[in-house]
Image (tube, rainbow, N blue to C red):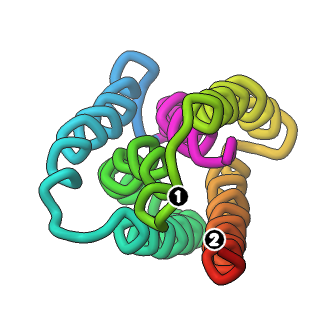
Amino acid sequence: MFLLPAQEAGFAGWIPTYAIKAGVSSASESAVYSSLFWSTNSAFRIIWVFLPLSATNKMKIVFLGLLTISTLLTLLQHLELYQLLCITGPLLLGIMTSVLYGLCLTLSIDNGFSSTTSNNANFVLANCIGETLLTGPMGYSMKIFGFQSLIVIILVSCIASNLSFHHALKSLDTDKQEQ
């Protein structure tokens, strides 16, 4: 679970550094990319609420979207289209990560299970750990392996999140059948 907030906070926090290292913007102008991320993220937190889909179906769309977007960003990076990456990355990842927190809290309810204070506290704790433990290493890997490693980390974490989500859905289906 802690990979999701790491993708959100890590990308938003490190995209200005990425833009500077890629030669896309100066230090004083680079904050616009983080602003772009958080602006779309904030706007789409509201928009996602009104989409008439179950939490599970929204999560499927989000995880597939994150995987597709991170693959696109990796391709843009390979083609050295850094300016395009620095614009589309914050916009698209901001849209897709905006819904994750709320949907993860409602996923168990959507699948017929009760939501308890203990389960919600564990979820919030996993998010806090993810934001804390993984965003620092993202920056450190950019220092060691170069700024391009940020996008590779986002891609790998999206793949891992997607696999984890599908495993969780299978577990929920198994638990439903046992009841």
- Residue marked by disc 1: 113
Which of the 4 image quadrants contains residue 175? bottom right
Horizontal and vertical percent for residue 13? 53, 28
Q: Is residue 162 magenta?
A: no
| Above or below, 162 relative to 20 | below
The region drawn magenta spans: 1-23
Question: Secondary structure of the magenta portion, mostly?
Answer: helix
Horizontal and vertical percent for residue 98? 35, 45
- Residue marked by disc 2: 172
In the image, farthest residue toward the right? 144
Nearer the observer: mark 1 or 2; the answer is 1
Residue placed at 61% from the left, 76% from the top? Answer: 176
Instruction: Estimate the spatial distance between the alpha carbons at disc 1 and disc 2, rounded to whole Å.
Output: 9 Å
In the image, farthest residue toward the top? 28
- Where the C terminus falls, by quadrant? bottom right
Question: Residue type at mark 2?
Answer: Leu
In this rendering, would 13 be left or right of 103?
Answer: right
Query: Is there any visible trace of residue 10 in the rendered image?
Result: no
